[in-house]
Image: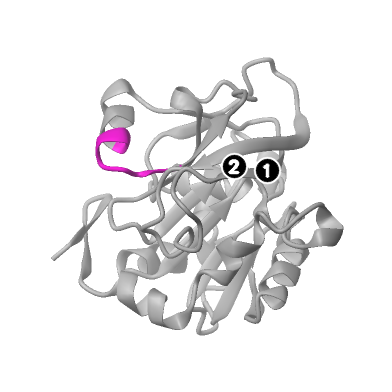
């Protein structure tokens, strides 16, 4: 597969993601924020960092980048889009995922390992894991507290759209210990932890590697077909 990796001013995890993509046997290509061309990517990654300096809110300016117009159209066609940390924030700001990311509950920047439980394995990004498997993945964020209105949170739970959930502790005070979610079509996923930083033994273990390994071209096709956009939802037809 070809992975397009977005680069905004302030992005810092693009090279880490590219390295993890290469380790998984795929091809990374960089996507500059001012360009609209996705360069034939089968999957687009919005990596971690501080896009545009996190002015206004984390991800609030990046959502207006020319690249994001193409990413949104790609997602609406069923294309695979994955946001990590700042990328998750951008997806929420762009309306591709519900809810939002706010300041951590204790107003501190956190950079440490956390533990998450795999809640959904029926997305192209998580199918290589076992349901209820516990992973150790690093976080690095100051605005990682996932929040959503009660009806939205209830819908995410009822429809199995919580992808990863914090266990052992809730580091940032996220609603329902949510560490990652997907859209209704399951082709757009946002997570706060950084799997690219736990993708090889030299990085402390391979728990994050399977996210990159799970997305074969045949799975991209399987999950992308028969998906159409209805408002901000992606429904199978």
Vertical arrangement, residue 159 with respect to residue 208, above or below: above
What residue is pinned by disc 1? 136
Task: Name the foreground residue: 58 vs 42.
Answer: 42
Direction left: furthest residue:
237
97 with respect to 114 (left or right): left
17 with respect to 212 (left or right): right
Q: Is residue 68 magenta?
A: no
Is residue 69 visible to the viewer in this orientation of the structure? Answer: no
Instruction: Specify the quadrant that holds the C terminus.
Output: bottom left
Q: Magenta stretch? A: 156-163
Is residue 236 visible to the viewer in this orientation of the structure? Answer: yes
141 with respect to 235 (left or right): right
Residue located 82% across and 56% down the image: 203
What residue is pinned by disc 2? 192
Instruction: Specify the quadrant that holds the N terminus.
Output: bottom right
**Position in image of residue 91 (x %, y %):** 47, 49
Residue located 66% across and 72% down the image: 21
Task: Name the foreground residue: 234 vs 1.
Answer: 1
Q: Residues within 10 Å of mark 1 (few under 14, many from 20)?
A: some
When asked about the image quadrant of residue 142, the answer is top right
Tally the marks. 2
When asked about the image quadrant of residue 18, the answer is bottom right
**Position in image of residue 214 (x %, y %):** 52, 69
């Amino acid at each position: 597969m070809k992975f397009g990796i977005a680069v905004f001013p302030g992005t810092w995890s693009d090279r880490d993601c590219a390295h993890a993509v290469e380790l998984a046997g795929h091809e990374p290509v960089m996507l500059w924020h001012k360009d609209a061309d996705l360069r034939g990517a089968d999957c687009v990654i919005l990596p971690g960092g501080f896009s545009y300096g996190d002015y206004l809110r984390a991800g609030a300016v990046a959502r207006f980048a020319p690249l994001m117009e193409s990413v949104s159209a790609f997602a609406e066609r069923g294309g695979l889009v994955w946001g990590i940390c700042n990328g998750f924030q951008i997806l929420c700001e762009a309306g591709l995922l519900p809810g939002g990311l706010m300041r951590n509950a204790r107003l501190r920047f956190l950079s440490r390992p956390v533990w998450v439980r795999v809640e959904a394995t029926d997305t192209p990004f998580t199918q290589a894991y076992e349901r209820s498997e516990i992973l150790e993945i690093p976080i690095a964020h100051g605005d990682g507290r996932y929040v959503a209105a009660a009806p939205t949170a209830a819908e995410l739970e009822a429809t199995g759209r919580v992808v990863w959930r914090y266990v052992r502790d809730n580091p940032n005070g996220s609603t329902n210990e949510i560490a990652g979610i997907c859209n209704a079509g399951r082709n757009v996923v946002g997570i706060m932890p950084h799997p690219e930083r736990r993708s090889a033994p030299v990085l402390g273990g391979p728990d994050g590697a399977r996210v990159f390994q799970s997305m074969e071209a045949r799975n991209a096709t399987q999950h992308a077909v028969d998906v159409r956009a209805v408002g901000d939802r992606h429904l199978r037809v």
